[in-house]
Amino acid sequence: MTDYREADFARLKTVPIARRSNKVDSSLLAHPPGPDRSFAAFWGALPAILAAQDLKYVVDRIALAAGRRAIVAMLGGHVIKVGLGPLLIELMRRKAVTHVAMNGSAAIHDFELAAFGATSEDVAAGLGDGTFGMAEETGNEMNAALARGAGGQQGAGEALAEYLRARRELPGRDVSVLVACAQLGVPVTVHAAVGAEIIHQHPTADGATIGANASTVCDDCPRQRNIKKITAFRRIQDVNNLDPEICLLEQGIPCNGPATRQGCGALCPQAGAQCIGCYGPADGVIDYGARLIAALASVIDSNDPEEIDRIIDGIPDLAGQFYRFNLAGSLLGAAKPAWNGN
Ligand code: SF4
Ligand code: SF4
């Protein structure tokens, strides 16, 4: 016996297949190219669905635009490490690619191929013995090239490409996308993840080169300040009428910009989100939280200390807000012995 009724499948609705819209029919299927061994026959034999269809579409659009419009190839590290760099170089030569935008991983793999003739370490083994990402020459040379380029107002792509082109020994000269960009005059940009690339964990990495400057995020932020005073702090996800022009702090959104090191170009406030301080304390900031308290207090519309305390207490996670990235460097640690009565 059971207290539950069994599902009655007879009551389910079915539909005639003629009324259903279908994504695949026999005209779209792959077909064997037959005795024709040409690449064109292979290409024509591919199915006209999903990835093969997407590939054909992209190829058609590039062919249509080649020589007439700018075509940007955007790539990650795998394009280089699985060996497609020489094909990209050929596309650049044929002017089918007019700009290369690569991530940090692609730049590192390409640099190593060019300068040392080999790349792609065994990640699992390197993580096991602590050597992952620690190839000495890669860190030294790339960081030196980037620092030199930054001094001359070059971006990372141009700096690395020019460094490689001038390097005396270059075993991978013919297969390097960076070198080809320098030789062919194709602009190349490198979009690194700040602090997350393997060369950023080397002793030669320089924060100022990577993008850190001396002042604060507020100095790069285009939002207007000294417009509003606030009577409460709010969580950004609870606000649906934020003014896109006015400082977030002055709209009651706790923004860490006033204490955070300049260098990212105020990415988050420009995109409508508060700075959470990932660049760390700005120059001269002794305690990040203390500097932020001062900044938060300056926008509060009250002179009454108790009222100011109450409004600041409205920030849900004060310790997280202030010390998400820099608790170890805060004065809280220094004060611990005092709390213990020492
Ligand atoms: S506090 Fe935030 S929103 Fe306001 S100016 Fe500084 S970075 Fe921009
Ligand atoms: S959170 Fe980081 S990236 Fe965003 S604005 Fe602040 S420092 Fe810049």
Image (cartoon, helix red, strand yellow):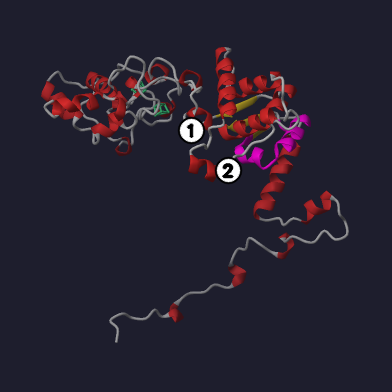
Residue 54 lies in the magenta-colored region: no
Q: Looking at the image, how many numbered discs can be counted on the residues?
A: 2
Rendered view: 164 above or below 119 = above
Task: Look at 59% across and 20% down and name the residue there.
Answer: 145
Marker disc for residue 196: 1
Task: Look at 23% across and 36% down and name the residue there.
Answer: 316
- For this orientation, the residue located farthest to the front is 129
- For this orientation, the residue located farthest to the top is 152
The reply to whether dot 1 and dot 2 touch (C-beta < 8 Å) is: no
Residue 319 at what x, y percent from top left? 25, 32
Mark 2 residue element: loop
Residue 223 at what x, y percent from top left? 38, 21
Residue 153 at what x, y percent from top left? 57, 14
Q: Nearer the viewer, residue 74 or 26?
A: 74
Q: CA distance from mark 1 to mark 2?
A: 18 Å
The residue that label 2 is drawn on is: 122
Rendered view: 4 above or below 190 = below
